[in-house]
């Protein structure tokens, strides 16, 4: 960051910011990072504790189920029922009485299964998986027949009913012996709801588990607290680093797996971070406000002085810096502001004097140029009258005299240096009529003027010199008939008047010389043309009427207004006049008092 290019206020603000706010922001960032790590560790620990508690409850439930199966297998009524050949109703009632006294929960479902394939004894429905004739070598029955655990031992088996659709996560089985031989099996199923009651309590007590499962060594899901539909399928751990996952062994071959999503922990961490950030931003806002107020109070005088200097550099010489009063009025900045205002007053007075001098100079220059133009066309007009008088005493002389009177009156009329386009066209038309009488039937004049510009303001005697220049230097030098056209349009707030003749045209060297004189007149219009020796004063010189007319327009309106000229040998000459559109109020009943 370019501190040198910054304003005084911003550098002060940066200093306060770096000294007071940056350390506070760093502390807030460190607090947010540390809190995230602490919460991450805490949630991992809570997840492990909850899984350990669930494993302990699952172990207790497994031990209880195995104890029930072992107690039933060693009981006398069960042994008598399995070893007796008749298996009468009295024996069945004794076994049922044993069920009622030994099993206190309906979530434990006992089965007495004769090894000879006879109908098993239970409280209700017998699933196919416990019928020896169907599944003697499969499932829990197959495991019991292969292992034949000794008295007091049991076999724990997960998901014993894969085909019956029963929700039994776990079952315990024991072998019943009579006279040294196996006569049957006792199996106790544990209903899924009992797992939910026991293990769900552990998951809820810690408050840190969203997923809790009981699995065997093969990875088969025996119980899933959150999704019962996945039970019986195999578990594939694809969670990656987005989950805290812990597993604890229940008994050999079985373990509990619990998990908690990192996103949940991070959401709590995000809340703490948001709170810390909110506090930090509030403190930042208060500190920043104080820094801004303090910086502004120090930098305000410098800023106001800088703004005033910029306004002065843009030409606003009336701009002044605000001078402070009260207890700050005697300091160094107040003295600097006061002296700057005094200097501006002096400069403004000098500029006013220069402007007044320039205005007087322009007025004198315009009057001198106009005075130079008047003798120029009067010379040609009087010469025409003299020629006509010598040739014959004709009534046309009266018409020429009338037109001349109008032209002279235009130059002598009061009301400033402006007339309207309509009036200027009338003067140009009078001059053309005078010249046309010298060459009867040879020259024609065409006018095509946009009515919108007829009342536009135009400097006096602008069009007449251009018409004169077209006749004298263009049409008269070309044998045969000739035409002159005057076209006027309004475009983009400017008036464009084009005077074109079909005369002999201007040679390229002379045209370049005239354009150079026009360029010089436009660049230094204040210089008096009377003292400019580079511009000939003779009528047949290099376009004195064009140059002086262009100089007048530049004096009054500035660039880019003025005259442009285009000419080609044998094709004629076109002069384009451009000036800003300014409408003049003309009374509807105004009449030219022409004599």
Image (cartoon, rainbow, N blue to C red):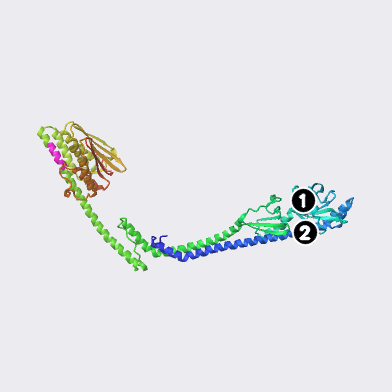
For image coordinates 15% across by 36% down, the residue present is: 400
Q: Which residue is at the front of the view, 275 or 140?
A: 140
Q: Give residue 139's mark.
A: 1
Q: Which residue is at the front of the view, 28 or 443?
A: 28
For image coordinates 33% across by 64% down, the residue present is: 337
For image coordinates 47% across by 66% down, the residue present is: 20
Image quadrant in which the N terminus is located: bottom left
In this rendering, does residue 59 appear at all? yes
Q: Tell which tag, 1 or 2, sits nearer the viewer.
A: 1
Where residue 420 appears, x then y in whole percent?
24, 42
In this rendering, is residue 411 above or below 47? above
Question: Where does the magenta region start and end?
Answer: 376-385
> For numbered disc 2, what is the local secondary structure?
helix
Q: Between marks 1 and 2, how big is the CA–CA gap?
A: 21 Å
> For numbered disc 1, what is the local secondary structure?
helix
Q: Which residue is at the front of the view, 274 or 389?
A: 274
- The residue carrying pointer 2 sits among few (fewer than 14), some (14 to 19) or many (20 or more) residues within 10 Å by Cα, namely some
Where residue 257 appears, x then y in whole percent?
68, 57
Q: Is residue 399 left or right of residue 173?
A: left
Circles 1 and 2 in contact, beta carbons < 8 Å: no
Q: Residue furthest front?
A: 146
In this rendering, does residue 431 appear at all? no
Determine the image quadrant of residue 299.
Answer: bottom left
Determine the image quadrant of residue 243.
Answer: bottom right
Any magenta on residue 305?
A: no
Q: Give residue 300's mark.
A: none
The residue at which mark 2 appears reads as 64
Where residue 286 appears, x then y in whole percent?
48, 63
Determine the image quadrant of residue 201.
Answer: bottom right
Q: Is residue 308 left or right of residue 389?
A: right
Any magenta on residue 378?
A: yes
């Amino acid at each position: 960051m370019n501190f040198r290019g910054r304003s005084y206020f911003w550098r002060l603000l940066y200093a306060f910011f770096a000294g007071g706010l940056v350390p506070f922001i760093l502390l807030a960032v460190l607090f947010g990072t540390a809190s995230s790590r602490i919460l991450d560790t805490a949630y991992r620990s809570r997840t492990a504790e909850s899984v350990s508690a669930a494993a302990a409850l699952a172990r207790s439930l497994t031990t209880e189920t195995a104890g029930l199966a072992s107690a039933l297998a060693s009981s006398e009524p069960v042994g008598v029922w399995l070893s007796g050949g008749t298996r009468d109703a009295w024996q069945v009632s004794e076994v049922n009485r044993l069920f009622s006294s030994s099993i206190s929960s309906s979530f434990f479902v006992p089965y007495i299964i004769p090894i000879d394939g006879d109908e098993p004894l239970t409280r209700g429905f017998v699933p196919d998986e416990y019928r020896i004739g169907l599944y003697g070598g499969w499932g829990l029955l197959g495991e019991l027949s292969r292992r034949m655990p000794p008295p007091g031992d049991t076999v724990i088996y997960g998901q014993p009913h894969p085909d019956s659709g029963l929700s039994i996560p776990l079952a315990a089985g024991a072998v019943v012996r009579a006279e040294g031989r196996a006569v049957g099996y006792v199996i106790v199923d544990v209903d899924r709801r009992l797992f939910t009651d026991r293990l769900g309590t552990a998951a809820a007590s810690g408050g840190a588990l969203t997923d809790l499962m009981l699995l065997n060594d093969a990875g088969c899901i025996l119980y899933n607290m959150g999704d019962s539909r996945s039970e019986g399928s195999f578990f594939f751990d694809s969670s990656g680093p987005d989950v805290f996952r812990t597993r604890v062994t229940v008994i050999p071959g079985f373990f509990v797996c619990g998990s908690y999503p990192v996103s949940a922990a991070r959401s709590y961490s995000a809340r703490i971070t948001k709170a810390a950030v909110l506090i930090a931003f509030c403190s930042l806002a208060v500190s920043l406000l104080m820094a801004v107020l303090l910086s502004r109070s120090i930098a305000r005088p410098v800023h106001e002085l800088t703004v005033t200097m910029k306004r002065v550099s843009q030409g606003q010489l009336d701009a002044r810096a605000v001078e402070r009063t009260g207890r700050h009025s005697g300091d160094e900045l107040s003295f600097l502001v006061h002296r700057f205002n005094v200097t501006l007053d002096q400069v403004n007075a000098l500029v006013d004097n220069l402007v007044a001098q320039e205005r007087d100079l322009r007025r004198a220059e315009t009057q001198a140029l106009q005075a130079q133009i008047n003798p120029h066309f009067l010379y040609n007009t009087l010469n025409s009258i003299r020629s006509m008088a010598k040739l014959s005493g004709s009534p046309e002389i009266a018409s020429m005299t009338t037109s001349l009177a109008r032209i002279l009156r235009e130059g002598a009329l009061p009301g400033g240096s402006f007339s309207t386009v309509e009036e200027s066209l009338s003067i140009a038309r009078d001059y053309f009529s005078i010249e046309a009488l010298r060459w009867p039937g040879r020259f024609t004049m065409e006018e095509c003027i946009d009515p919108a510009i007829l009342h536009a303001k135009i400097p006096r005697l602008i069009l007449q010199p251009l018409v004169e220049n077209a006749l004298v230097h263009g049409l008269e030098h070309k044998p045969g008939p000739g035409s002159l056209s005057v076209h006027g349009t309004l475009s983009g707030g400017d008036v464009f008047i084009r005077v074109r003749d079909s005369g002999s045209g201007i040679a390229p060297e002379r045209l370049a010389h005239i354009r150079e004189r026009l360029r010089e007149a436009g660049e230094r219009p204040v210089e008096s043309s009377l003292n400019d020796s580079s511009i000939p004063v003779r009528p047949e010189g290099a376009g004195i009427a064009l140059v002086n007319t262009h100089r007048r327009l530049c004096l009054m309106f500035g660039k880019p207004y003025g005259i442009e000229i285009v000419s080609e040998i044998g094709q004629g000459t076109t002069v384009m006049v451009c000036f800003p559109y300014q409408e003049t109020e003309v009374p509807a009943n105004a009449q030219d008092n022409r004599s």
